[in-house]
């Protein structure tokens, strides 16, 4: 039967079957699990170690190193590039079979590349760059020559890219080994990574909760240690939300710092210039890996490859000559945080103070509360028409979560777009004042990533705590703090009327809700710095991370 004669649902199902069959064929038979976990198993983290598919050396490589230490071990020839690439390809294969986190698989190409990198070092040549031999995974949005960039849309399958994204070339020039791309939600405008082609990505920490979106495949793969360094994109929280959900470090830079050219987003070229630009950034297991990513990419001078990138080399900051001054922002004035979210801010504040960091309470709700509605308006400038054109070209239905939330709209009139951008500039100008108080400069501030803990599948609420900093173009990152515990189930929301519809929906995730679903999920904080001050944000996030680890070390001793 020809594809044209199939019913719409059957057409999409046929494409899905072909793509999944292609995936399966790219996983060596000896790397396939003989059985999958029973439904009562809700945490998959220990399965790669227990399944017997990875050798002791492969377990060590994937579990005991971060990207910085892997790069060092390769440079010193204590580990080989092929040895490292094989370990991560195998572990990614196991992670995918458990969580459905991958889209494109190119393990054979990765092993060939790793062999060439080994030969390069063996010949006495210097490493290609800071990432020589380090495996890097990428969100499906990035074009890699010879492979699809379908973003989970049937109409974009089996149309391999003819050129690499600029960031892909930067990573290759820095010596990285690329080996897989990761799953996303349909339209990239959902907070749980499900599409009709590849299906849903599962959170390996707790299968009852979301893995996040839209870089959800990256988050799940990192959580399973199937990647040591991943790359996502963020326009509403799509790096930071999966980082929170899967317990990794995540970093959204200002949009002009890391190249985004050559990615597929379901929009026409130039669309971001009339709406809100997207940013590309890393997800990682350590803060020093976040810095390694920036250093490696910016050494390639990406501003010579695409005009949107500012010519700003990476400059590692020395410790401040004064105490860091870090603010605490508790609420955005749109959605009130749940009790454990406020408690985790208090815990981080106490640990920062103990580490000698100056902490400043900040109330920026009069400005913060204006961001969400303006960001939402700018997301809808084009009306989603090009994305709907793609979907309808393959008669593809919307994912269930999107059915009531997304529809084709008339594009905005030019004067309306102009008005929105005028409001954005006014708001950004007013926000400049928050970075100083009567005692001087504020380096960064912490705030919630979300007003709730990691929620059940398809129950993530508003993104006001993340999308606001895309609107403002502030670099923002996520630092994991600890896991949700039984004591965190205590506390009630304020006894007052909800602030609005978003707040009302958020309360339903706490009041008259089985809070035990949050057990064993990560609690994190978001850290925000002024525009284009990525170095400052890395410095502050690292200081916070050190403070948290110092406290954990002291607690372990006691």
Image (cartoon, helix red, strand yellow):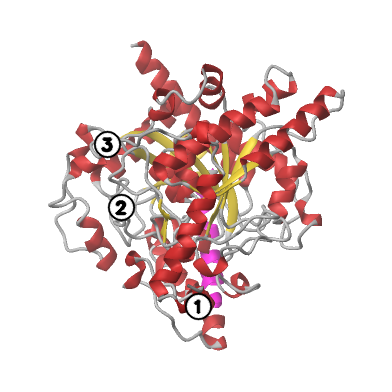
Magenta span main SS: helix
Q: Nearer the viewer, residue 292 or 10?
A: 10
Question: Image check: 284 left or right of 48?
Answer: right
Q: Residue at x 39, y 71 (%)?
A: 9
Residue 327 visible, this orientation: no
Q: CA distance from mark 2 to mark 1?
A: 34 Å
Question: Image check: 13 left or right of 343?
Answer: right
Would you place residue 349 above or below residue 444 in this image?
above
Would you place residue 447 above or below residue 504 in this image?
above
Residue 204 visible, this orientation: yes
The answer to which image quadrant residue 165 occupies is bottom right
Query: Mark 2 or 1 closer to N-term?
Result: 1
Q: CA distance from mark 3 to mark 1?
A: 39 Å
Question: Per the image, is 339 magenta?
Answer: no
Position of residue 214 measured from the top left corner of the image (x, y, whole percent): 46, 56
Q: Which residue is mark 1?
A: 4
Position of residue 121 measured from the top left corner of the image (x, y, whole percent): 81, 26
Name the outermost residue toward the top: 557
Position of residue 456 measured from the top left corner of the image (x, y, whole percent): 28, 50
Q: Which residue is mark 2?
A: 457
Q: Which residues are magenta?
A: 420-441
Q: Residue at x 46, y 68 (%)?
A: 375
Report crowding for label 3: few under 14, some 14 to 19, many 20 or more residues within 10 A (C-alpha). few
Report crowding for label 1: few under 14, some 14 to 19, many 20 or more residues within 10 A (C-alpha). few
Foreground label between 3 and 2: 3
Query: Mark 3 or 2 closer to N-term?
Result: 3
Question: Per the image, is 424 magenta?
Answer: yes
Foreground label between 3 and 1: 1
Q: Which residue is mark 3?
A: 38
Report crowding for label 2: few under 14, some 14 to 19, many 20 or more residues within 10 A (C-alpha). some
Query: Mark 3 or 1 closer to N-term?
Result: 1
């Amino acid at each position: 039967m020809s594809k044209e004669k199939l019913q719409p649902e059957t057409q999409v199902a046929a494409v899905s079957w072909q793509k999944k069959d292609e995936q399966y064929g790219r996983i060596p038979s000896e790397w396939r699990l003989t059985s999958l976990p029973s439904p009562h198993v809700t945490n998959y983290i220990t399965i790669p170690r227990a399944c017997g598919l990875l050798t002791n050396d492969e377990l060590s490589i994937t579990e005991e190193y971060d990207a910085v230490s892997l790069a060092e071990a390769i440079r010193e020839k204590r580990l080989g590039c092929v040895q490292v690439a094989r370990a991560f390809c195998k572990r990614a294969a196991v992670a995918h079979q458990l969580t459905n986190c991958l889209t494109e698989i190119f393990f054979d190409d990765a092993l060939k590349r790793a062999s060439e990198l080994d030969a390069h070092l063996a010949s006495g040549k210097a490493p290609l760059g800071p990432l020589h031999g380090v495996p890097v995974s990428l969100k499906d949005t990035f074009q890699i020559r010879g492979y699809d960039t379908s973003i989970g849309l049937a109409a974009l399958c089996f149309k391999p890219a003819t050129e690499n994204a600029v960031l892909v070339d930067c990573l290759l020039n820095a010596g990285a080994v690329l080996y897989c791309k990761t799953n996303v939600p349909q339209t990239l405008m959902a907070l749980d990574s499900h599409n009709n082609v590849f299906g849903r990505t599962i959170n390996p920490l707790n299968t009852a909760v979301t893995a996040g979106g839209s870089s959800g495949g990256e988050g799940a793969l990192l959580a399973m240690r199937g990647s040591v360094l991943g790359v996502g994109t963020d326009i509403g929280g799509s790096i930071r939300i999966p980082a929170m959900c899967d317990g990794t470090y995540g970093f959204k830079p200002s949009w002009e710092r890391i190249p985004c050219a050559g990615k597929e987003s379901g929009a026409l070229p130039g669309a971001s210039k009339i709406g809100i630009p997207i940013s590309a950034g890393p997800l990682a297991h350590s803060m020093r890996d976040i810095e390694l990513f920036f250093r490696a990419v910016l050494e390639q001078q990406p501003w010579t490859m695409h005009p949107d990138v500012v010519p700003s080399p990476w400059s590692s900051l020395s410790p401040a000559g004064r105490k860091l001054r870090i603010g605490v922002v508790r609420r955005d004035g749109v959605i009130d945080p749940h009790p454990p979210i406020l408690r985790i801010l208090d815990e981080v504040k106490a640990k920062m103070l103990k580490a000698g960091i100056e902490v400043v309470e900040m109330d920026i709700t009069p400005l913060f509360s204006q961001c969400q509605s303006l960001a939402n308006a700018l997301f809808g400038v084009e009306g989603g028409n090009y994305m709907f054109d793609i979907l309808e070209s393959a008669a593809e239905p919307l994912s269930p979560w999107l059915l009531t939330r997304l529809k084709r709209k008339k594009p905005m009139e030019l004067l309306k777009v102009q008005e929105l951008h005028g409001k954005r500039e006014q708001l950004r100008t007013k926000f400049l004042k928050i970075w100083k108080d009567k005692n001087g400069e504020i380096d960064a501030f912490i705030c919630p990533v979300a007003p709730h803990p990691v929620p059940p599948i398809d129950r993530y609420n508003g993104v006001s705590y993340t999308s606001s900093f895309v609107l403002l173009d502030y670099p923002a990152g996520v630092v994991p703090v600890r896991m949700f515990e039984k004591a965190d189930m205590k506390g009630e929301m304020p006894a007052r009327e909800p602030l609005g519809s978003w707040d009302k929906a958020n309360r339903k995730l706490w009041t008259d809700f089985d809070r035990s679903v949050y057990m064993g999920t990560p609690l994190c904080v978001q850290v925000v710095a002024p525009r284009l001050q990525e170095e400052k944000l890395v410095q502050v996030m690292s200081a916070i991370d050190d403070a948290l680890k110092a406290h954990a070390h002291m607690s372990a001793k006691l």
